[in-house]
Image (spheres, grey):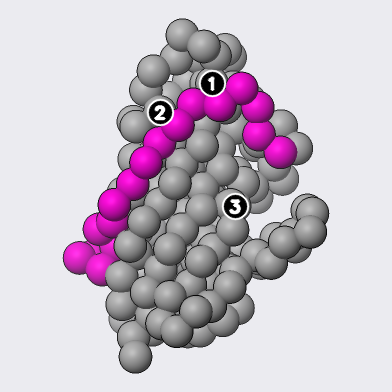
Amino acid sequence: MTIEQTLKDLGHELPKPAAPAASYAPVRQSGNLLYVSGQISIGPDGIVKGRLGDGTDVAAGQKCAEFCALQILGQVATVAPLEKIAAVLKLTVLVASHPDFNEQHVVANGASDLFIKVLGEKGKHARAAFGVAALPLGAAVEIDAVIELEA
């Protein structure tokens, strides 16, 4: 079964990769490593905005993180077939948060869980999650990734 079929079976569709919103490359390759620029929470209806702990709850934040993971896979697909993914090595998760909100790690699980469901052991990764005052375009979540491709 292909990764795209697995996504469909989980109720997801691989999104069309978002164009960069500023002066950067959405993905860069060095050897077998892909560095995917921060992908914001874009769902089927556009950018999902909000701030966790201030009108946006953890479940909605997890869905936003899942949207970011899908965007990351969309960017990877512009460089290589998804079946060439050897490992998701590292995610950095930025969560627009109220100063009192402290469950960024739980929000990040939305992306982590998707990668593991879709890629199995290859989807397990190192991760950092941070609360920030604001994200580009008002997005609730932004995630960047380092992904290893098969040789």
**Left or right of 125, for residue 12:** right
Marks 1 and 2: CB-CB under 8 Å? yes
Question: What residue does disc 3 label?
Answer: 39
Front residue of this view, candidates 15 and 133: 133
Check disc 3 and give the amino acid type: Gln
Residue 8 visible? The answer is yes
Residue in view at x 34 percent, y 91 percent: 151
User: Which mark, by number, is residue 97?
Assistant: 1
What x and y, as percent, mark residue 47?
A: 69, 42
What x and y, as percent, mark residue 41?
A: 60, 44
Check disc 1 and give the amino acid type: Ser
Label 2 SS: helix
Report the Cα–Cα distance between label 1 and label 2.
8 Å
Choose top left, top right, bottom left or bottom right for residue 19.
Answer: bottom right
Check disc 2 and give the amino acid type: Gln
Q: Is residue 133 magenta?
A: yes
Front residue of this view, candidates 45 and 18: 18
Please tell me whether residue 150 is drawn above or below residue 142 in the rendered image: below
User: Which mark, by number, is residue 82?
Assistant: none
